[in-house]
Image (cartoon, rainbow, N blue to C red):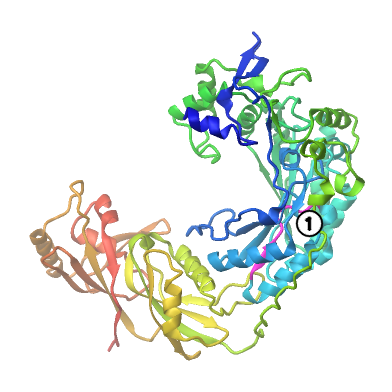
Amino acid sequence: KAHLLEDLSRIEGVYIPSYFQFEYFQDGTIKNLHSTKSGYGRITKRLLANLDTAPYCTASLVPFMQIIHDRINLEIARGCSRGCRFCMAGMIYRPVREKSLQKIVELAEKCLASTGYEELSLVSLSTGDFSHLTTLLKILMVQYKKDCIAVSLPSVRVETLSRAIMDEIKQVRKTGFTIAPEAGTQRLRNVINKGITEEEILETAHQVFSAGWNLIKLYFMIGLPTETPDDIDGIVDLAKKISSISKKVRFGNQINVSISTFVPKPHTPFQWIAQTNPEVIYQKQAFLKNSLRGKGIRLKWHNPSMSLLEGVFARGDRRLGQVLMKAHQMGAGFDGWSEHFKPDLWEKAFQECGIDNYFYLRERAMSEHLPWQHISCGVSTDFLVQEYHKALNGELTFDCRRAGCQGCGLCAEHQIKSDSISGHQNQHSTPFPPAPPAPPVNGPMFRYRFTFSKSGPARYLSHLELSRCIARTLRRARLPLAYSQGFHPLPRITFHDALPVGMASLCEVFEVLLTRRIPCDKSVLLINQHLPSGLKFLTGEEITLKKNLLPDTIEIKHYTIVFPVSQNLQIPGTDCIRGLIDGFYSRKEFLVTTCKSGECFKIDVRQMIQHLAVRENGTIEIAVKMTGSRIPKVADIIGDILSLGEKERKALTITKLPTQKTTEV
């Protein structure tokens, strides 16, 4: 390890904490910091000047379950020159660098082809500041509108959001819009250097609702430096003004107001500011909860105890390592989920380690040695001090990309010119290939029926997860899918049945509408190359559009049931099972209890069971006649017949066999 650390320390930008030693005063502040390695006293951030040369993952994992960011997140630029004084990312990721249009389109094509996602998010700290955003949106819309691929912009400042951008985005689907005033009054927005006016915010809200959106998310912070009760009132006033605009445009529009607690961050002008006490934050939240009531406004807020913990670790030092370990040993984990967050446990961990958590929330003197002072992100301390004083005076600092250099020191630190890497001078040097012609909305449709098996790990997919997985697989296989019309276009896929979670099947069926004919055998082979483990397409055939998916017959569904090999389960032997089956056949009625949607009821399954037997190897065969709307689960039927416990029922491996149909006389 020592040799490895020695080698790593020779790489610019690599930080080896063990090569630095801290000394502390009696009051806990840092007295001195010295390096134990010669020539290794300051760590300077590495800078990638050309984003086009950066490696990029174009074949990411695609989860079966629906995740929060269930889309492609494609970085189009890095860095931000707006200079918001609370924003750590805006300081440490300077300067602004943009990918070329050609590179973005190339990466988008690769990402969409490898994942099958239906949404592409153009990511940067301030996407609206991308030099050629409108052109990029037009290119992407021309290329992917036919495939109903939506494009979203997660971070757009109100002054950069034009009607042209809105019109491009809404061509496929109206993805969400977020406006981040951050503060409720212009005075406080000037303090944090947000640089937007109330008029711009209200005008943007009006444009968004007029363009057809029915939801706007508003982001605010409380506990900002110099904040007064008038600033909290301003949040209420601004939210209500936007709500009033939404009602004038269309009844039923929604405003989601999100309130977070300001946490001072390192490498920002506010790194010396004290963080507001949680008790005060609770009072401000209570006022907002009481004031922002009414139809059309929904308030969300962040747990102040969690913000306290965030503030401690944001500006803490290496002494917090023992607290982190102690809390982990005491059972802390998944703290980002409110149901798992245990503030009392963390408080106890701090106490047992003899550390005052509020020590790290205090105001820092300008002369105090900060724990991160030996790490340089390029922005000078003199600039941060200057911005701190300008904040207290309510003075703005303008964007250096538009108003010239503001003296942050980064360009001098890296000996670069900001305009040489902030954007590409010639974004159109390479012609873009023409987009494939979009199929007409009312053009011919072709209906195909596919069968597939579901086994192994795939049997634990819910029906929703399965349908999403297959839709994305068909996109990866480049099938010419037909889509529904309306607000949220979806592939026109219809499933024959919905399997319970945990059940395997050898004979699942779905139908899909396509915009042109395909060779079925070749398509099945192609689709199987893109399917995850446990799913396999078996057959495909073209059928007439008028043919019914569900025949007018009574189905008898066949299953096999296998018991797991485990000594911890109470599984009856083969002879015992035969006896229990004989007992079942000897009865005229057999009631099975099943529960759905919280309601439990008993159903007579004696006449439903067409066949029930056990093989020599212990595998059970069962055939169930599907009549009526209330059909018990196979696990409940066999569990009641064999008197199995809940644990044993969940461990059964149930496989659905190809369906046999008989016409009822």
Write the start and end of the magenta stretch as one range: 149-157
The reply to whether residue 171 is visible in this rendering is no
Q: Circle 1 sits on which residue? A: 130
Residue 491 appears at what percent x and percent y? 56, 74
Residue 413: which quarter of the image?
top right
Assign the magenta stretch its main secondary structure.
Answer: loop
- Mark 1 residue element: loop
Q: Nearer the viewer, residue 614 or 314?
A: 314
Residue 430 appears at what percent x and percent y? 75, 70
Amino acid found under the numbered disc labelled 1: Phe
Query: Any magenta on residue 152?
Result: yes
Q: How many marks?
A: 1
Residue at horizontal 69 percent and vertical 37 percent from the top:
45
Position of residue 664 relative to residue 18, above or below, is below
**Residue farthest to the top?**
26
Residues packed near mark 1 inside 10 Å, few (<14), some (14 to 19) or many (20 plus): many
The reply, left or right, for residue 96 in relation to residue 532 is right
Q: Nearer the viewer, residue 538 or 343?
A: 538
Residue 604: which quarter of the image?
bottom left
> Which quarter shows the C terminus?
bottom left
Residue at horizontal 66 percent and vertical 22 percent from the top:
360
The reply to whether residue 630 is visible in this rendering is yes
Residue at horizontal 45 percent and vertical 89 percent from the top:
543
The reply, left or right, for residue 483 in relation to residue 395 is left
Residue 261 appears at what percent x and percent y? 70, 35
